[in-house]
Image (cartoon, grey):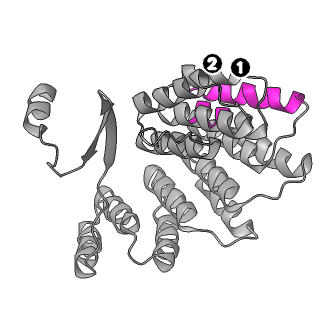
Amino acid sequence: MQEENIKPSEFTLVSLLNACGHLGALEQGNWIYKYVKKNNVELNVIVVTAIIDMYCKCANVEMAWHVFVSVSNKGLSSWNSMIMGLATNGFEDDAIKLFARLQCSILKPDSVSFIGVLTACNHSGLVDKGKYYFQLMKREYGIEPSIKHYGCMVDILGRGGLVEEAEEVIRSMKLEPDAVIWGSLLSACRSHGNMELARWSAENLLELDPNESSGYVLMANMYATSGQFAEAIDERISMKDKHIEKEPGCSSVEVNGEVHEFVSGRKLDSEFHDIYSLMH
């Protein structure tokens, strides 16, 4: 577009910012933000939100906050992006405080705002506060919980060791639980040793998605931890018979403007041996 001397629209820039956020390409995102300022692109709500979201996803919360506080033209989506960015980057207390500021502003929190504050409660282990916001959402704002809200609540209770309460939440849902909810409960059961509830979770998870590897892996690990090695082997054999493989972990890092992706068990990077030597 630049070579053809075509001026990008705000939708073009937002698409580029979203791409940078998903890739973790901070240097490229920085360049786009500088382009926006240099060319006097209108900082409307959509563009501001995309910039904040990009910086948060690239883990540069300081720049995201700078943009958030420096612009006057920010809507609810900008607040929501900042709350979620703080919650997912280790600034849970700040996310909760920002949510409280939102409550006192002329704007009203929506369903996305509550996902942000529940995420903050989840990451910081604030079970009682999570329960409070979950109830507040419907009682004061008339917002019916979505599957994502229920997912947050089940995870909050499960991580806090309240797996029976998490089960009650699932049984009381008006919506059908999805794989994320069953996976959260199963993971909590493994952490807190509730074998009976783990089996129930795994059955429902595999009923929704028979090829979901996490159900088999978590159950196999639970059996092994409790000394039931025959059952653990059965789970692994079942995975092999059904040609189900555990999804490998993946991470990425940007160096000199280039995004490098690392996948567990693979040696695809051309400089793998140099990296391995440096780490060891």
The amino acid sitting under disc 1 is Val
**Residue at screen point 23% across, 70% down:** 233
- Range shown magenta: 81-105
Predominant secondary structure in magenta? helix
In the depicted structure, whether residue 198 falls above or below residue 253: below
Looking at the picture, how far across and down is residue 4, in whole percent?
45, 43
Residue located beneath label 2 in the image: 66
Q: Is residue 59 left or right of residue 41?
A: left
The residues tagged by marks 1 and 2 sit, at their Cα atoms, a distance apart of 6 Å
Residue ID at (73%, 41%): 77
**Residue identifier under label 1:** 69
Place residue 257 in its image quadrant: top left
Horizontal relation, residue 25 to residue 85: left or right: left
User: Which residue is located at x 31 percent, y 65 percent?
Assistant: 220
Q: Is residue 201 magenta?
A: no
Mark 2 burial class by Cα count in 10 Å: few <14, some 14-19, many 20+ = few
